[in-house]
């Protein structure tokens, strides 16, 4: 049987891994994946506090658990939860009960977070709320571009978020709502391919901007967010736009003299 010291040490490393992987959902959905290059493995400091630490196991299982007031600190990230557990055989880490993950640019809350280490996949589910507060970056080439708007503070709510960190693909599913200043977008799901910078929305997409203009599509909406190569494609789209219709005035406008009509009226 493994010693208590070994169990605690391994639990610390794996709970930290879960926190970092779950946080990647927030990073990816903000289109700001910070780890674009592979780095060699290295030991880094992780601090974990919890009221009760336990290990249970046998020939077919090995479970590490922490319960009560869990606080995990790793670099500039802090994870808090009521419970955390690591299944060593299945290599699955879970954290639940008032789950909250905070770093310098993101805050995400939900009922439960799970990291599937073998699958390179993390999931947050249950009343998920992500608030992004990106740090000021260099002035974008086009302040009105989709890329520029992604760097503005944004709130995303949904039932479930998932991040496949090997493929760098993020998903938000169920009752999706994105709010940014006076812009609102709702739908059923969103998929963001970080590498391709491609966003796909589906499930009854509806959007309203700060000017009260609207757009909707019952089908799929795709958008490229690459700066300088942006485009949007939508199925069966419908838009309501507000267009300035100014009457022609000045020298270019001919004024009809009183009492005179057109040639056709004679």
Image (spheres, rainbow, N blue to C red):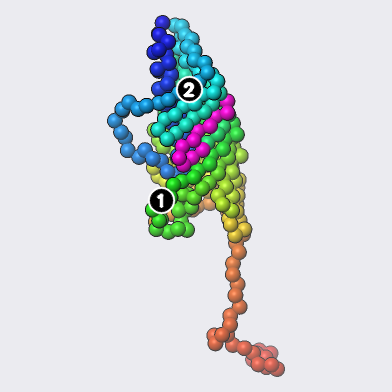
Give the quadrant of residue 140: bottom left
Q: Residue at x 44, y 52 (%)?
A: 147
Q: Is residue 225 above or below residue 26?
A: below
Nearer to me, 70 or 134: 70
Look at mark 2 in the image and give the residue it sits on.
49
Look at mark 1 in the image and give the residue it sits on.
137
Give the label, 1 or 2, closer to the camera. Answer: 2
Q: Residues within 10 Å of mark 1 (few under 14, many from 20)?
A: few
What stretch of residues is rendered in magenta? Answer: 96-107
Q: Is residue 261 above or below residue 237?
A: below
Q: Position of residue 255 (x, y in %)?
A: 62, 88
Q: Position of residue 28 (x, y in %)?
A: 45, 40
The quadrant of the picture occupied by the C terminus is bottom right
Give the quadrant of residue 32: top left
Q: Residue at x 47, y 11 (%)?
A: 55
Q: Residue at x 49, y 50 (%)?
A: 152
């Amino acid at each position: 049987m493994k010693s208590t010291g070994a169990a605690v040490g391994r639990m610390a490393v794996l709970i930290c891994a879960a926190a970092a992987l779950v946080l990647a959902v927030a990073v990816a959905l903000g289109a700001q994946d910070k780890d674009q290059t592979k780095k060699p493995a290295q030991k880094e400091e992780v601090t974990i506090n919890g009221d009760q630490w336990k290990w249970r196991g046998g020939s077919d299982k090995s479970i590490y658990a922490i319960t009560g007031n869990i606080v995990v600190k790793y670099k500039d990230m802090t994870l808090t939860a009521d419970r955390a557990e690591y299944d060593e055989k299945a290599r699955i880490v879970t954290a639940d009960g008032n789950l909250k993950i905070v770093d310098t640019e993101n805050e995400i809350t939900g009922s439960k977070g799970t990291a599937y280490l073998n699958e390179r996949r993390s999931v947050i589910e249950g009343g998920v709320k992500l608030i992004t507060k990106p740090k000021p970056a260099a002035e974008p080439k086009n302040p009105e571009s989709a890329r520029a708007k992604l760097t503005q503070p944004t709130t995303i709510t949904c039932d479930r978020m998932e991040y496949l960190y090997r493929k760098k693909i993020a998903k938000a599913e169920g009752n999706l709502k994105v709010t940014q200043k006076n812009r609102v977008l709702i739908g059923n799901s969103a998929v963001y391919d970080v590498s391709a910078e491609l966003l796909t929305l589906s499930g009854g997409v509806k959007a309203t901007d700060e000017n009260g203009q609207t757009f909707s599509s019952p089908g799929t909406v795709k958008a490229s967010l690459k700066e300088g190569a942006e485009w949007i494609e939508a199925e069966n789209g419908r838009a309501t736009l507000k267009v300035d219709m100014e009457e022609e005035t000045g020298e270019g406008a001919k004024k009809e003299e009183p009492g005179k009509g057109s040639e056709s009226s004679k």
